[in-house]
């Protein structure tokens, strides 16, 4: 079983269990995953980015603490997310694996982002790899 951190189009964050990583895509396409708060089926995996130098540790931390209802904060979060998408490599479900390799110098240091399970995030943090969620904004559309 894999637990994923998810978020709906309104920005509600929640978690859900899946048998395999492919199950999220399959169930999501069929509209079988809905937000427990508003019932929306427009749900995406929350993406994570490591707080590497090129992204900025402070920016990542303030995003993690941000209140998405605050207009100024939303603007900052949008810019931050855009920055991540423009400057980091999307590694999909291999996020934890790649973040760890970068941390241990097994691959070139670069900015990456992708999906990780809460367990993977906890393990990474225990190993000293700082990661932060990339905000999902309420007005985003996939
Ligand atoms: Zn919702």
Image (tube, grey):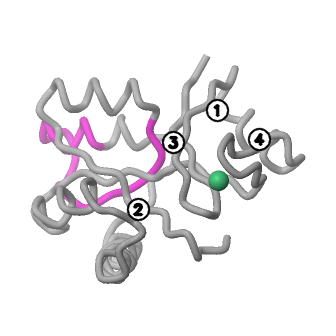
Read off the magenta span: 99-116
The number of numbered discs placed on residues in the rendered structure image is 4
Tag of residue 21? 1
* 3 or 4: mark nearer the eye: 4
Element carrying mark 3: loop
Which residue is under mark 4?
Answer: 33
Farthest right residue in view: 30
Q: Position of residue 42 (x, y in %)?
A: 73, 58
Which residue is under mark 3?
Answer: 93
The span from disc 3 to disc 4 (Cα, nearest Å) is 19 Å
Q: Quadrant of residue 32?
A: top right
Q: Residue at x 30, y 82 (%)?
A: 72
Dot 4 and dot 1 residues touching (CB under 8 Å): no
Dot 1 and dot 2 residues touching (CB under 8 Å): no
Residue 80 lies, with reference to residue 62, above or below; the image says below
Q: Position of residue 43 (x, y in %)?
A: 68, 53
Tag of residue 41? none
The span from disc 1 to disc 2 (Cα, nearest Å) is 21 Å
Which residue is under mark 2?
Answer: 135
């Amino acid at each position: 079983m894999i637990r994923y951190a998810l978020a709906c189009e309104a920005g509600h964050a929640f978690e859900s269990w899946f048998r395999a990583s492919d199950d999220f895509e399959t169930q999501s396409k069929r509209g079988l995953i809905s937000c427990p708060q508003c019932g929306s089926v427009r749900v995406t995996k929350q993406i994570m980015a490591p707080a590497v130098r090129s992204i900025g540790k402070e920016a990542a931390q303030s995003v993690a603490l941000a209140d998405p209802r605050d207009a100024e904060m939303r603007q900052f979060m949008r810019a931050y997310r855009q920055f991540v998408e423009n400057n980091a490599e999307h590694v999909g479900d291999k996020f934890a694996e790649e973040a760890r390799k970068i941390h241990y110098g097994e691959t070139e240091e670069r900015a990456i982002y992708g999906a990780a399970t809460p367990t993977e995030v906890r393990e990474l943090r225990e190993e000293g790899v700082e990661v932060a969620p990339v905000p999902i904004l309420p007005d985003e559309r996939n």
